[in-house]
Amino acid sequence: MAKKPGPVVVTRKGASWPVKQDGDVLSTHRTQRAANDAARREAIKDGVERITQGRDHRFISKDSFGNESKRRDTEH
């Protein structure tokens, strides 16, 4: 059985916003919004979490697209 991929993470590096998963850079974007859009698509495809870090590398958003409980997500 193949191992489920890890979460998709958006972080800042210099002037760009890379989208990473399992230590690999999937794509790099000029804006955080573009990176979040790409990360969301990838997370939905893989059924995993998307984690967004701000300029200071603190988590600012976290969404799950995998096995969720019946309880509604209250972050958004």
Image: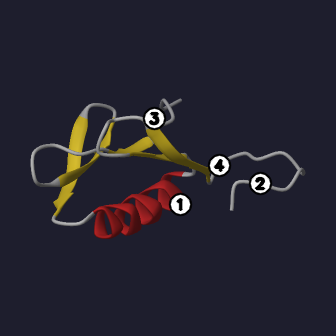
Residue 58 horizontal/vertical position (percent): 41, 35
- Distance CA(mark 3)–CA(mark 2): 20 Å
Q: Write down the quadrant of residue 5 in the picture.
A: top left
- Distance CA(mark 1)–CA(mark 4): 8 Å
Helix, strand or loop status at disc 2 = loop
Q: Is residue 55 rendered to the left or right of residue 40? A: left
Q: Callout 3: 10 Å neighbours few (<14), some, many (20+)?
A: some
Where 51 sits versus 45, above or below? above
Residue lying at the far left in this picture: please name it.
14
Helix, strand or loop status at disc 1 = helix
Q: Identify the residue at image location x=33%, y=32%.
A: 22
Q: Identify the residue at image location x=48%, y=29%.
A: 3
Mark 1 in CB contact with mark 2 (< 8 angstroms): no
| Quadrant that contains the C terminus | bottom right
Q: Which residue is mark 4?
A: 66
Nearest to N terminus: mark 3 or mark 2 = 3
Mark 2 in CB contact with mark 4 (< 8 angstroms): no
- Distance CA(mark 4)–CA(mark 3): 11 Å
The label number, if any, that marks residue 73 in the structure image: 2
Nearest to N terminus: mark 1 or mark 4 = 1
Nearest to N terminus: mark 3 or mark 1 = 3
Q: Which residue is mark 3?
A: 6
Mark 4: which amino acid? Gly
